[in-house]
Image (cartoon, rainbow, N blue to C red):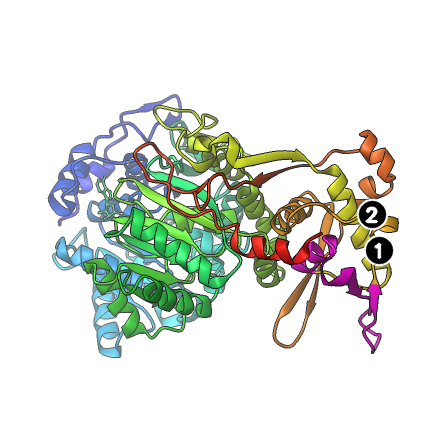
Amino acid sequence: QPATTAAINGKGKAKTSGTIDYAMEFDWAPQLKGTMKKVFGISSFRLCQQGGCNANMDGRDVVCVMPTGGGKSLTYQLPALLTPGCTLVISPLISLITDQILHLREAGVEAAMLTGGTSKALANEIQQRLTAMASARGGGQQGDIKLCYVTPEKIAKSKGFMSLLRKLVEGGKLARIVIDEAHCVSQLGHDFRPDYKKLSALRQFFPHVPILALSATCPPRVLQDILKILHMKPVVDGKAAPREGTVYFSAPLYRKNLHYSVVPKPSSAKEVVSAMSQYILQNHEHDSGIVYCLTKKDAETVATSLQDVSNGRIRTGVYHADVADGQKEGLHRQWRDGSIQVVCATIAFGLGIDKGNVRFVLHHTMSKSLDGYYQESGRAGRDGQDADCLLYYRPQDATRQSSITCTDTDGTAKLHDMLRFAQDMQECRKILFAKYFSASSDLSMTSWTTEESSAMDKCGHCDNCTRAPETIEHKDVTIEAWQILKILEAVDAQGGRQTIAGLSDLARGLGGGSFEASGKRKKSKEKVQLDYDAVAGGKVGLSKDDIETLTVQLLVSRYLGEAFSSTAYTVNVYVIPGELALRLTRLTRAEVVHGNGPRIHCSFKRQTRKGKASAAGAGTKRKTAARDGGDGGDVSVATVAGS
Ligand code: ADP
Ligand code: MG
């Protein structure tokens, strides 16, 4: 594809009084559209593709945030074909790059990749071609590499490659630097990669080469961090961009074909898998899907048991970091051609999934942040057709996640946002996402606006929008909260510690109502009998599940806190009185009963008819089949407790 230099030199039509509206059509519109149709077979732009292409063609620094599957690649691939020189693309994963190269070659575009895995001979050849481009005179030549993909360690670690880039820049042949999955540069994002941080060198070495940063999830603080690390100027709005600054585009983050539900997760591992199997067979018997699991081991166990429990009707595959590369490729292939129906995976499975017809994404355990959850669940329905996103949630999983995320920057705060989302049984999921992603910024509030609705309109089809009122109970549980905090204070005073699950048992008087009082340093573990009447005016009269739900509620509202203690194998997570605890515990029971002090409200899931869901799917024509799994463990424990 010969470079169309004339168009690039053309001035944008839509320029008025110093600002530019990149969403308009520019002089080069015919070339853009022609090439888009001819090379990629695409006849109209989506989301902010037109604006992104225009700003790129105009040589601006650009940040473009579009949902997964939105079509971010086109925003640089199209301008790359219409601009002389080579566009450098930095992308985190080899599988992702391979995929892009394959698509580009099919479209007849000269593209190359240089990664750690590239053979020496091939690397030499590519480097020679780039060197030749650097020293060639004039515009484009036949055979020029229009797009060169590299992994970030090429920039971070290869001096040779950096000097090759310098030659390209000096010859005026480095058209642009694209940073795909740009949130990976920020430790505040959900997928930080150390090599990405080193990309800050690019602007320092090549101050005049425009940068395009692409991402699907980029909350305001991550955006600011990206700009800082990459040395990009503050963002300006792509609809009224002055000549200076980074042009920012953000597509609607809300995808109305995704139907979100949080469903109760049974307490036994076996039941979780049966619930999933039942859900899949009833709603998506012949559809492709993903089950996201917390650990590699979980992914393997779930894959095996899902296949077993469905008598082989659900064919599963496993994907995580330790699966061999060859196997991963095989899995991708089998998943694409349908011989594997469900991929059970850790979050390692994600970037670069190029499959449009994923009809469901189930989360076996909640993600460690809402950014992560949005991104992972967003792999469903990229073709625009209806898809379901189910989060299997039980409060005890907070402990599992917490033990992993407690060492991350802001790990606890992010997990708490995730927990608030999971525990919320009233607010529309779209609004919850919108509030989270737009916190403290008016830039991305617009991201949740669609042509038909504004950001704060309910979606009308998530679990909370479609919930039958009798499936939840909202209660004032200030007394129970006060009791829990009092009990925990008593345990704390004796040097004891409680997990979420342990606290729930103790609060109900299980195990004889005693707890281990030994502090860390004491050798012998001493059992202490809890005097419920004296400490808390009696046992807590809620079920195990309800107490756990309340405990998480108290945790995210800071009445409870967490303490971590690491052993050689794991990190144990305990609940302790939180910074706000005194607001309640300084009151007497009578005062609380009387209505003094703060009030604590909590929503609890209720089972309506036997085995019927208060759950899943939503939408009128959609079956709601995921089981309300809160039963099993709860029922049996309640029988044992008999309190
Ligand atoms: P992202 O990087 O934003 O996740 P991709 O760039 O990989 O998304 O594009 C996802 C899919 O959408 C690709 O198969 C691509 O060909 C397709 N696509 C991109 N833009 C359009 C468009 N304007 N119309 C139709 N399909 C498109
Ligand atoms: Mg992409």
Decide which of 114, 594 is in the foreground and name it: 594
User: Which quarter of the picture shows residue 621?
Assistant: top left
Q: Residue 20: where, in percent of width, then height?
A: 36, 28
Decide which of 319, 505 is in the foreground and name it: 505
Q: Is residue 177 visible?
A: no
Amino acid found under the numbered disc labelled 1: Ala
Identify the residue under disc 1: 490
Query: In the rendered image of this protein, does residue 489 appear above or below residue 537?
Result: below
Q: Residue 91: where, in percent of width, then height?
A: 35, 59
Q: CA distance from mark 2 to mark 1?
A: 9 Å
> Is 610 inside the magenta-drawn segment?
no
Q: Which residues are magenta?
A: 499-528
Amino acid found under the numbered disc labelled 2: Ala
Q: Nearer the viewer, mark 2 or mark 1?
A: 2
Q: Residue 172: where, in percent of width, then height?
A: 29, 53
**SS of the residue at dot 1?**
helix
Q: Residue at x 73, y 49 (%)?
A: 560
